[in-house]
Amino acid sequence: MTGPAQEADVVLRLDGITRRFGALTANGDVSLDLRRGEILALLGENGAGKTTLMNILFGHYVADEGRVLVDPDGGGLAELEPGSPHAALEAGIGMVHQHFTLAENLSALDNILLGTETLAALRSARAPARARLQDLMKRSGLTVPLEARISQLSVGEKQRVEILKALYRNARVLVLDEPTAVLTPQESDTLFATLKTLAQDGLGIIFISHKLAEVLASSHRIAVLRGGRKVADLPTVECDRRKLAELMVGHEVVETVRAPGSPGATLYALQDVTAGHGRDALHDIDLDLKSGEILGIAGISGNGQTTLARVISGLEPPVSGTATLEGRALGHAGARTMIDSGLARIPEDRHHDGIVGAMSVSENLAIEAIRKRENQRFGLLRFSAMRARARKLIAAYDIRCQNEASPARLLSGGNIQKIVLARTLETEPKVVLAAQPSRGLDVGATSDVHQRLLAARERGAGVLLISEDLDELMRLSDRIAVIHRGRLSPAEPTETLDRGSLGLRMAGHGGEEAA
């Protein structure tokens, strides 16, 4: 697997791919081979060109220069028709996106069959399809209840359905984008064991990830993009975390280390709080956040984290129970009251809830403090003062944009998150609500986010960290609680916990549930 590629082993070749968007070169002369039976990890900073490259492979974009060649059946490499997802599917290329594309109201079997039958067919060939899928599941280990509705399946089972969709279409190349972003550690282990089995059966696999530990543990080879160009293509056995981080960002990345702290009195508390409805409802939540600590909330997506964040930030009133800030009952305080009381929010969806895309960087940086004297006088906005403040924050937080007047929507995810961090932390809030603060960020941007949160903790703020990334929680949190089906476990010191037990609790096993 680590020797020179033999032409007969190559199932996919990207040859000199270049793609420009105006003056920006998203991909510059990128060449890459994938062999049969190989697991290739694709790494790079946010904006490095990984997604653009995969969109060209799958026909969503057309390269300005270069070509894609595929050999799904061993007959030799042939050029793939550019700009045609149908041609990519026919050539045996399957993609599993980070956000699943499944019809929740249909069964797993119906989702797999969608698009595989012609309109001229008089009836659906469900029996032969079911038999073929049973054989696929047996060989691959990707077991799912075929007749169950997607809405009834766990996140891990939904991902298996996505992979089975690709295999059912005879995929010989499988591309996965951040495949473990919403999985528990046990589900992640199961996924990579399955991928190794599929690779042994001759499938070529590319997966995009920011998690260096899983890249080192599960890939045969690693390719790194930086600034749209390939800067490394190495056997995994020649790599380590430090080397990969430096290749990705172009300089040494400082590992975030949480020093022992001395938490103070309770800053914010919830008592017997019930809120929301449906799968994301909260039931009798108790929570206490102390000054000078980071309290981590672990859980699989859809177990009440979104409602918890909305309640704390004042966007959704609780149905019952009480919330207090510094011992003062908050009642049904709204978002403006919470901001004025010293709470700052890093929202889960930075694009939808974190910025107004059509507004400039300077306007987004001022948006939550627009009523303050430095931003307005006699009811008129002081744009010059806003721009001057923005320039200082752009330098302090290394927000990479053309200037403070640039529309925020044009920035990468990592730079949008830096806008949110600057707006949130520069006011030195008492309480910081950080929901999935490093989701989808590269190692350099993640390190910066973590250092900012630890700095807030050091100056005495209470930080509530809601995350699905156990490595992030274990690295930053003083205490960790687990949320499952809207119920929150008592918080425990991080030193008494391990990733395995937390993963089991996130899935509803262990602790009180097991008892």
Image (cartoon, helix red, strand yellow):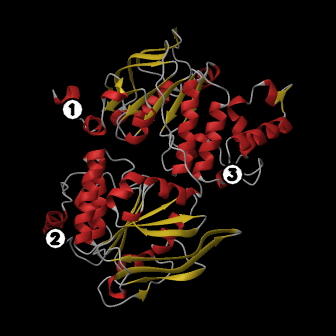
Q: Is residue 248 above or below residue 70?
A: above
The quarter in which the N terminus is drawn is bottom left
Q: Amino acid at mark 2?
A: Arg
Q: Nearer the viewer, residue 217 or 323?
A: 217
Pick whichever of labels 1 and 3 is earlier in the sequence. 3
Residue at 44%, 80% in the rendered image: 13
Q: Nearer the viewer, mark 1 or mark 2?
A: 1
Residue 366 image point, x, y percent: 72, 35
Residue at 54%, 31% in the rendered image: 454
Q: Residues within 10 Å of mark 3 (few under 14, many from 20)?
A: some
Q: Is residue 388 left or right of residue 164?
A: right
Residue under pointer 3: 400
Residue 354 image point, x, y percent: 59, 40
The quarter in which the C terminus is drawn is top left
Q: CA distance from mark 2 to mark 3?
A: 51 Å
Q: Is residue 344 left or right of residue 9?
A: right
Residue 459 image point, x, y percent: 60, 23
Q: Amino acid at mark 3?
A: Arg
Q: Is residue 102 visible?
A: no
Query: Residue 372 sits in which quadrant?
Result: top right
Q: CA distance from mark 1 to mark 2?
A: 36 Å
Pick whichever of labels 1 and 2 is earlier in the sequence. 2
Q: Secondary structure at mark 3?
A: loop
Q: Nearer the viewer, mark 2 or mark 3?
A: 3
* Circle number at residue 510: 1
Q: Is residue 349 above or below residue 341?
A: below
Residue at 46%, 32% in the rendered image: 465
Q: Nearer the viewer, residue 162 or 177?
A: 177
Q: Nearer the viewer, residue 212 or 183?
A: 212
Q: Is residue 300 visible?
A: yes
Residue under pointer 2: 132
Q: Amino acid at mark 1?
A: Gly
